[in-house]
């Protein structure tokens, strides 16, 4: 088994040295990083990295303080070991950033599969950490890559004060075989499922141009990541308390989505995979009423009943299931623990949250307006990461 | 038209227009037959809102994604009518396609193949050397596409000779005897594209032996993917057979287990031809609109033979380009095209497959 560790930035931390939350050196580093990405000829044109640079802007970072009112009484836990996703080459940087804000030293493992895509960003980080002002960070943090190897996972796990795993369920179980030190904490981000709730009346009232704006935001939540991100909605609930003509507003909506999706790169491999998935659902999904196609860009599956577990209803590259409900009481019972993000359109967030709490649902961690599903937050999968990754001195 | 009458026609004599007037009513009826007889297929058509009355041209016939033969048992016959189940030759661990054949469909596949290949080889049966191992038939449980192709082409054999032994090693002695016995007479050499390259051309070269097969026809198929991996172009492939064995008459063919029999033979000009026994439509990935001559797209294949299973209209996972209609310099009528190989896989974004590398 390959057991070579390649260092992409920083140095292996030898003596963990926690920092306060939002420490000036970390904030300074993040500002420098944001600027460097925006000035980098390779990265400035890459939407994923440009979005990260924008996310790092000072005001936005400082706004996270409001999520943790006692942050000034807190200190980092020590050394965090991150195992980060293979196919979005920027999540590792979000994971590192949040852990730095929580005052930790870090070992961040990126997969060899995304090494090339992540290399420019790692180089920028390395350059900043070599500067006099940020040298301390470079000595206590490192980004590394190595082929999947339980022995290295075990070695890193044995010295850490916390482990963060962004992984598929099988990978998480595998990595969990490596036992953490007794006091260490763990954050896992498993396979999740996301959906949306639309208020039919709100969309009925929309003008065509308003509809187009919503459709464009919805496009960003879904097609941007090939609808393959955990927080991208798969199933749309149409909240229609009165039995008005729901079909016509649905038609208008999907046409607007198809219009927004004309910029999507539907390559032959995606079109073919999507088409096969559609036929498979057509043959095997018993609760399917009808399928509508808007070219090959949007496939819409209208359901006349819900299966026991809704999380099997999922497709990539622009496939959406839809189901009409009369009220939220029809919605909360289907929220099982795999459900993560609920994107809403025309719904009151507090009202929906209260409904979830009142119903005692096992799932549903995050309510966002359509257009914000992909935005990474320190609050993720129902946990405040800043809180979990730091300790309060009471 | 009755398929037996169809078989009495010359394979490349129909002009495209003429062909489509036969195809449209035939395929509309065939779709209806499968809709009634294959439960899964019928259910899918209902959900997809297929309306037979709105079938105005051949491109309106629904196309089934080829992948589904790997995941679903699709048949339009009763279980006691199953004559054999053809499985595609996938590598170990991969799902394989299952094609359910009744006796009539299997027979029509054979007869169709015979008509097509005869057009290229002439009528007489030839001594045939198969660049494969007889062990391909060892597993009697599974009727693989590789075995099916060998059996199918064996119809043209006066007698058969396998060039490889059970361990896939080239049998120089046997090849030598075959060359000796048939000196100066036309022979047929058949095999999969990559196997001919690896187990015949390269294996004989490594042993520094050479034979004169200037009297041979080479027929090969099975796809170009592995050849692309070793960076061998179709031209280089042909040149190699010419230089090493003196072979001029090399015909590649395009075909698949899901529509056995109606293969697309490559003519003297290097074009794949649709015979009267099948047709292709090139589809734009974006909306499945029909691509005109010259524009690459996904290949859809149509076969009137597929009666026992709903595979009369299939969307393949191959890319190709229509080169022309009715006007190939070789004189064969109908559509002719090129095949670029499997749809290129691309990086798919997302976070569901995170660590499993």
Image (cartoon, rainbow, N blue to C red):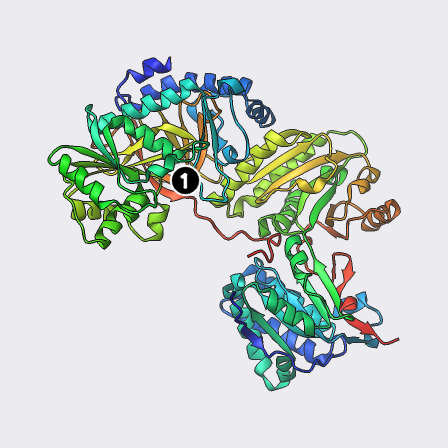
Image quarter where the C terminus of chain A lies is bottom right
Residue sitting at x 78%, y 45%: A347
- For residue B331, say whether it is visible: no
In the image, taking residue B245 as reference, residue B17 lies left or right, namely right
Residue closest to the far bottom: A132
Q: Residue at x 61, y 80 (%)?
A: A138
Q: Secondary structure at mark 1?
A: strand
> Which residue appears at 33% of the width and 48% of the height?
B227
A244 shown above or below A146: above
**Where on the picture, by quarter, is residue A146?**
bottom right
Q: Position of residue B150 (x, y in %)?
A: 32, 33
Number of numbered markers: 1
Reading the image, the residue beneath label 1 is: B318
Q: Is residue A300 above or below residue A381?
A: above
Residue B41 position within the rendered picture, expressed as x and y whole percent measured from the top left? 55, 25
Which chain is mark 1 on?
A: B
Asked if residue B229 lies left or right of residue B130, the reply is: right
User: Percent position (x, y) of residue B38?
Assistant: 54, 22
B345 or B185: nearer the viewer:
B185
In this rendering, the answer to whether A169 lies above or below B50 is: below
Tell me residue A174's x, y (percent). Answer: 65, 58
* Quadrant in which residue A22 is drawn: bottom right
């Amino acid at each position: 088994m390959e057991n070579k560790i390649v260092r992409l930035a920083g140095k292996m931390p030898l003596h963990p040295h926690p920092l306060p939350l939002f420490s000036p050196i970390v904030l300074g580093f993040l500002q420098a990083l944001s600027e460097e990405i925006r000035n980098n000829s390779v990265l400035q044109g890459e939407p994923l990295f440009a979005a990260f640079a924008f996310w790092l802007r000072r005001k936005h970072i400082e706004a996270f303080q409001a999520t943790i009112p006692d942050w000034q009484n807190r200190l980092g836990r020590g050394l965090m070991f991150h195992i980060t996703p293979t196919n979005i080459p920027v999540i590792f940087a979000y994971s590192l950033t949040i852990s730095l804000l929580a005052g930790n030293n870090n070992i961040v493992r990126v997969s060899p599969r995304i090494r090339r895509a992540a290399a420019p960003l790692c180089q920028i980080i390395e350059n900043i950490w070599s500067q006099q002002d940020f040298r301390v960070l470079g000595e206590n943090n490192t980004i590394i890559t190595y082929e999947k190897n339980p022995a290295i996972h075990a070695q890193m796990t044995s010295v850490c004060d916390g482990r963060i795993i962004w992984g598929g369920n099988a990978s998480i179980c595998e990595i969990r075989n490596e036992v953490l030190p007794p006091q260490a904490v763990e954050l896992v981000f498993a396979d999740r499922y996301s959906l949306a709730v639309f208020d039919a009346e709100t969309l009925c009232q929309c003008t065509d141009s308003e509809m187009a704006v919503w459709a464009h935001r919805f496009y960003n939540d879904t097609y941007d990541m090939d609808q393959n991100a955990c927080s991208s909605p798969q199933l749309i609930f149409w909240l229609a308390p009165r039995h008005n003509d729901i079909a016509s507003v649905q038609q208008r909506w999907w046409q607007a989505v198809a219009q927004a999706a004309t910029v999507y790169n539907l390559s032959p491999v995606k079109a073919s995979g999507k088409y096969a998935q559609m036929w498979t659902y057509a043959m095997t999904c018993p609760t399917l009423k009808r399928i509508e196609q808007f070219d090959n860009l949007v496939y819409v599956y209208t359901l006349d009943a819900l299966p026991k577990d809704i999380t099997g209803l999922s497709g990539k590259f622009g496939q959406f299931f839809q189901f009409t409900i009369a009220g939220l009481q029809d919605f909360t019972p289907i929220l099982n623990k795999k459900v993560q993000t609920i994107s809403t359109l025309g719904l009151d967030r507090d009202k929906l949250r209260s409904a979830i709490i009142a119903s005692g649902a096992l799932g549903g961690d995050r309510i966002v307006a359509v257009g914000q599903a992909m935005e990474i937050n320190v609050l993720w999968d129902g946990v405040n990461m800043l809180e979990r990754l730091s300790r309060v001195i009471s | 038209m009755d398929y037996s009458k169809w078989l009495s026609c010359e394979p490349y004599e129909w002009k495209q227009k003429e062909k489509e007037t036969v195809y449209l009513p035939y395929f509309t009826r065939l779709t209806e037959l499968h809709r009634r007889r294959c439960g899964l297929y019928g259910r899918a058509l209902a959900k997809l809102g297929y309306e037979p009355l709105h079938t105005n041209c051949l491109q309106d016939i629904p196309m089934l994604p080829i992948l589904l033969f790997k995941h679903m048992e699709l048949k339009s016959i009763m279980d006691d009518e199953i004559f054999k189940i053809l499985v595609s030759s996938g590598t170990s661990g991969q799902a394989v396609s299952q094609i359910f054949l009744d006796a009539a469909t299997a027979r029509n596949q054979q007869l169709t193949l015979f008509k097509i290949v005869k057009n290229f080889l002439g009528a007489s049966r030839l001594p045939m050397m198969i660049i494969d191992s007889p062990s391909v038939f060892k597993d009697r449980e599974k009727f693989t596409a590789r075995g099916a192709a060998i059996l199918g082409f064996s119809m043209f054999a006066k007698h058969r000779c396998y060039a490889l032994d059970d361990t896939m090693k080239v049998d120089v002695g046997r090849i030598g005897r075959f060359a000796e016995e048939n000196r100066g007479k036309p022979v047929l050499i058949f095999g999969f594209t990559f196997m001919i390259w690896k187990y015949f051309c390269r294996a004989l070269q490594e042993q520094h032996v050479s034979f004169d097969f200037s009297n041979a026809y080479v027929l090969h198929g099975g796809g170009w993917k592995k050849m692309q991996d070793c960076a061998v172009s179709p031209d280089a492939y042909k040149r190699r057979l010419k230089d090493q064995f003196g072979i001029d008459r090399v015909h590649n063919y395009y075909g698949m287990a899901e529509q056995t029999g109606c293969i697309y033979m490559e003519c003297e000009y290097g074009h794949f031809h649709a015979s009267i026994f099948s047709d292709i439509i090139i589809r734009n990935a974006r909306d499945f609109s029909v691509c005109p001559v010259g524009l690459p797209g996904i290949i859809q294949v149509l076969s009137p033979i597929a009666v026992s299973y709903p595979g009369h209209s299939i969307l393949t996972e191959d890319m190709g380009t229509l080169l022309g209609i009715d006007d190939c310099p070789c004189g064969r009528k109908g559509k002719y095209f090129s095949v670029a190989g499997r749809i290129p896989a691309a990086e798919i974004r997302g976070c569901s497959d995170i660590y499993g590398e």
